Amino acid sequence: MRKIIFLLTVLVITNLEAQNQDCNIKYNLMSGNVKAKKYADAKPDLEYLLANCPKLSVSIYQYGARAAEKTKDHDLVKKVYEARIANYPNKGVAKAHSDYVDYAIKHKLISDDEAFKILELAYSISPEDIGVKNIYRYFEGITNRYKDTDPQKVFDTYDNVVEAVGEKLDGYNERLAPLLKKEEAGTLTAKEKRTLRAIKINSKALGQVEGGLDAMIESIATCDRLIPILSRDFEANKSNATWLRRGVSRLHNKGCKTDPLYAKLARAYAEASPSSDAYNFLAGVLEKNGDVSGADEMRKKAFNLETDPIKKAKLKLMEAHDASGSARKRALALEALQFNPNMGKAYLLIASLYAKSANSCGSDVFEKKMVYVAALNKARKAQQVDPGCGAGRYVSSYSANVPSKKDIFTKGISSGSTYRIGCWIGETVRVP
């Protein structure tokens, strides 16, 4: 009897080893064909792996998805997707959901409602792993479903998504700075060139998503709508630092600072979270109440408390937006750039200040249009150092307002020569 059991055990082990060997061979053939872009040749081995070795490696599904998608085998795409979710429920699932939605929508395989349900699941698992298009698609679904019945859900989702996008953009900016320096010096390796290109593409895409989300929520997040909701929920959240930060930030960004609720939220936030961020909001309240010295002291306190240079730059930029006078705003934006030279939004603030001064900083058409050249230079700089800051529309707008060849000829100035812009701007630029 023992001999029989032993022989059966040996037989089972031998069969398992043989099957594993077959699985490894099939996997190597399948992945090799995918790498060689022989997608049709990869499909028979993929089918074998799905049927016999579904837990051999998650890479089965990564290569398999490419083979199925490239051959436009919709049934196989769905099969690979479902098998991956079933066999690797804790490994890159949010991205798998997002990738499947991209393919399925492109080929009209699922409805908008079905896509939203999958993205809702992906978002609940890992929002940062959802593709750029699907971040927008998911938020659009939330907005359309809840803007009238539960606007707070829309606001909460917006905050979560924008914070995740912001963190990604900050991460890209940190990696971008040294690469741009090496690019300028001409010392980039081939690998670094690919990395730089990928960061620029991803940053720009994320910036477009951020702009799209802002545009979508614009009609919902009005002072008339925000104040009643925040007032209603204040008592239940007066010690909730995250809720308070988001509430006071939204009122600040939407220009609702004159309402007493803004000061109430700012004070509660400072009590719940004695942080640089909270003190900076509180400084605005003090300034509004006429306590200018107290506001300055509070801003210094906030700034000195912060150690992260990127966050220091954000504090300075926020102060710049709140400051009075174009020259003061620019000075603070330039201070922000000392802490984060890749802060595109600081350059864009300066660009917008210049553009707004075009009529007052020029005595004729040429001089006024040259102010737009200075604005355009700042917008282009923003686009260069921070592809995700949304500089594209600024560049397009200012480009349309620079002097024409006729303007330059009429003025009697040569194209390519330098020109000094007076007024408070005081910059020398090149004539286009």
Image (cartoon, helix red, strand yellow):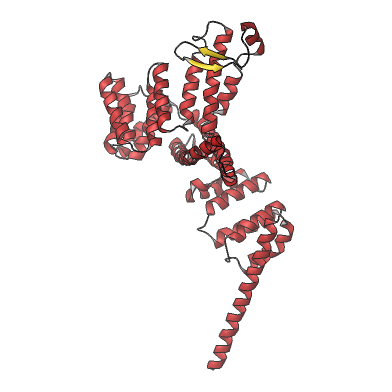
Is residue 17 placed above or below 286 in the rendered structure? below
Image quarter in which the C terminus is found: top right
Q: Please say whether residue 106 is visible from this viewpoint.
A: yes
Residue at point 46% right, 14% down?
426
Q: Position of residue 21 (x, y in %)?
A: 63, 73
Q: Position of residue 398 (x, y in %)?
A: 57, 20
How far across and down, in percent of the image, does residue 48 sit? Answer: 67, 67
Residue 1 falls left or right of residue 155 = right
Q: Is residue 218 above or below residue 238?
A: above
In the displayed structure, does residue 74 sit left or right of residue 215? right
223 displayed left or right of 281: right
Q: Nearer the viewer, residue 360 or 15?
A: 360
**Residue 112 in picture, x, y percent from top left:** 61, 43
Q: Residue at x 61, y 68 (%)?
A: 53
Q: Nearer the viewer, residue 331 or 2?
A: 331
Q: Quadrant of residue 258?
A: top left
> Where 24 falls versus 346 (above or below)?
below
Q: Quadrant of the N terminus?
A: bottom right
Question: Number of callouts in the render?
Answer: 0
Q: Residue at x 57, y 24 (%)?
A: 395
Between 405 and 294, the residue placed more toward the observer is: 405
Residue 78 seen in this snapshot: no
Q: Please identify the quarter of the rendering in which residue 156 is found.
A: top left
Quarter of the figure with residue 411:
top right
With 122 as the anchor, is 64 left or right in this view? right
